[in-house]
Amino acid sequence: MLATEHKCVLEAANALEREGFRVTILPVDRRGIVAVADLERAIESRTAIVSIMAAHNEIGVIQPLAEIGKYVANAASCSIPTPPRRLVRFRSMSKRWRSI
C-alpha cells in the first residue's frame, strides 16, 4: 500500500501487523505517484494484497494503474484499487463544459 492511503486504510494495515502479517508501505514521489519499480521490488511470492488508491481526491493524483496492473497480475496478487469516483465525475463534468 502507499504512504498516501486514507488514514483508515493505514490503521487497518497497522492492525494486520499487530496480528503478525508483514505490511509494506511504499513511499510516493513529490507529486504523489508511486515508483512502479519500487512496487515491483516489493511484490513477493507471498504477497496477498496490493492496495493502491487509484485516484486520490485530496492530493489530485491518478496512479499509473495500467503499469501497476502488469506487476500485480504477474505476481498473482489480489489488487484492490480504490474506485476512481472523482475521475468519473471529472469526465462527466468536462463533457458538460465542452457542450457549453
Image: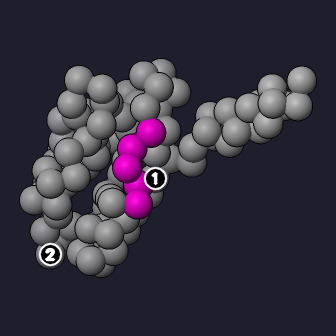
Residue where numbered disc 2 is placed: 45
Residue at 22% x, 52% y is: 36
Judged left or right of residue 84, residue 56 is: left
Residue 26 in percent (x, y) is at 18, 42
Q: Which residue is outermost to the left?
A: 41
Quarter of the figure with residue 14: top left
The mark found on residue 43 in the picture is none
Q: Residues within 10 Å of mark 2 (few under 14, many from 20)?
A: few
Residue 27 in percent (x, y) is at 18, 35
Residue at 52% x, 27% y is: 57
Compared to residue 9, the image places residue 64 above or below, namely below
Magenta stretch: give its range. 62-66
Residue at 22% x, 34% y is: 28
Front-most of 63 and 27? Answer: 63
Q: Residues within 10 Å of mark 1 (few under 14, many from 20)?
A: some
Can residue 54 be seen from the camera position used here? yes
Residue at 37% x, 65% y is: 69
Compared to residue 13, the image places residue 30 above or below, namely above
Residue 59 in percent (x, y) is at 42, 22
Mark 2 residue element: loop
Compared to residue 56, the image places residue 52 above or below, namely below
Residue where numbered disc 1 is placed: 81
